[in-house]
Amino acid sequence: MIWIVIFFFILVGIGIFDYFRIRNFDEFVVAGRKQSEPFVLMSLLATTMGASATLGVVNLAYGIGFPAFWWLGAGSIGLIFQAIFLSEKVRAFAGYTLPHIAKIVSGEEGKLITAIIIAFSWVGIIAAQFVALSEIIAVITGNPNTLPLLIVTSLVITLYTTIGGQLSILKTDALQFLLLAGGLLYSFYYLFFVSPRGSSVSVFSKIELINDQFDMTNLAYFLLIVGGSFFIGPDVFSRNFTAKNGKTARMATLKAGIFLLFFAILITSIGLWAKELSIDTEKTNVFVYVISNYLPKAAGIALALGLLAAIISSADTCILTSAAIIENDIFKGEKIKNTRFFAAVIGIMALIIAIFKKDIISLLLYAYSIFTPGIVCPLFIAIWFYKKRPLNKIIWISAIISGGSLGLLSNVLNMKYLALVGMGLSLILSIYSTSSGKQSRIPAGRK
């Protein structure tokens, strides 16, 4: 318990230190746009390897086998494609947020609608990180009552992010990623090569990309809906904005995609190890149970701290990104105090959701299934054809609304294929918006 208290004090201390160093909105939101490739790379990995990449994937692998790999595998593909097609372009725009980019390529209307969708859906992602945090701290403290832990940790992370901004986040991301990577590598080595229950031969003989529990529809869903959020996403773009130039952004994103592929296999393997042993997890998270019962105590605590660090990295980035979007893109301001206020509100809203809904993967899919069908294809097309073809804004915004609406319906009706249909429809309308004649504007009365 003492290590968690120390860790939280360090985070808040860093936040207070940067509070007095931040001079303007640029430094608070994008850390001055002067970060080197190693820091952008580690920040990307720390951000993307949060609750979904650790606790969620291990749990999923325990349930459906190796196809759980596709959660991070799709993310890896998304990052690599972003590096090839978008990263340099995104950095060159010198924006603050993803909706800021939407404004540049499509106008004020595009900025507002993307900002609203992200602000609405990203709260679910933050809630998922908070749930994961409480489960990890329960392992470290041995306290099975996660509700008080959920409340305390969520408030601490919200406070630290609100105070220190992007400068504090980037400072801690590198350390957080190194802690997590070291913990995962040791866990894999111990479980497969040291533990008397190691069974690498039987585990790796069951590698399959699809199976009875994960068919081609599920694969398409992961590749498009999950992978799409890595290809174009507010938290991933926020790392591009901090890079010192376009080449730095592109190389950091490309390497992050490659490294993420490696960690996807590593993390999935841990879930397969637990599945092979038919471990009775007693309704707790599988990874949490493995850490508590199958790793040496010191190693378990070290890995738990690494997981804690990585999940914090994802949570703080998402909180700050959402707050910046509300201040800069919805209210058209650049005031640090307002951004801090919105960060606090978002953190509290995510905490409330986390208290009532504690399934990490379902929280993440809720967010992705709204965001990806609505935003990814229209924004990619708008960026790609920027200054090449005029954009029919009415059709383009229709693409966002139709995709996002079908994604929302897929959640409400629990019909995954609707999100895929929404993404296809938004792609068709987005392409048509660039080939339908002269640029159009939405009438003033409809703004």
Image (tube, rainbow, N blue to C red):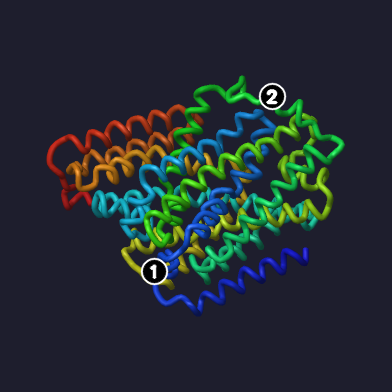
Label 2 neighbour load within 10 Å: few <14, some 14-19, many 20+:
few
What number is the disc on residue 206? Answer: 2
Query: With respect to residue 427, does 318 lie above or below?
Result: below
| Amino acid on which disc 2 is placed | Lys
Q: In which quarter of the image is residue 432?
A: top left
Q: Position of residue 47 (x, y in %)?
A: 54, 53
Q: Is mark 2 on a helix, strand or loop?
A: loop
Q: Residue at x 12, y 41 (%)?
A: 438
What number is the disc on residue 315? Answer: none
Q: Where is residue 381 in the image (x, y as percent from the top left)?
A: 29, 40
Q: Of marks 2 and 1, which one's residue comes earlier in the chain?
A: 1
Q: Is residue 11 left or right of residue 102?
A: right
The mark closer to the camera, 2 or 1, is 2
Asked whether 152 or 208 is in front, the reply is 208
Q: Residue at x 37, y 41 (%)?
A: 376
Query: With respect to residue 232, does 418 lie above or below?
Result: above
Q: Which residue is drawn at 57% across and 68% down?
A: 160
Q: Where is residue 148 in the image (x, y as percent from the top left)?
A: 70, 59
Q: In this view, does 221 lie to the left or right of 281?
A: left
| Amino acid on which disc 1 is placed | Asp
- Residue occupying the far bottom of the picture: 20
Q: Residue at x 51, y 44 (%)?
A: 257
Q: Quadrant of residue 361?
A: top right
- Residue occupying the far left of the picture: 438
Q: Where is residue 137 in the image (x, y as percent from the top left)?
A: 72, 56
Q: How far apart are marks 2 and 1 (CA)?
A: 50 Å
Asked whether 363 or 92 is in front, the reply is 92
What number is the disc on residue 26? Answer: 1
- Residue occupying the far right of the picture: 196
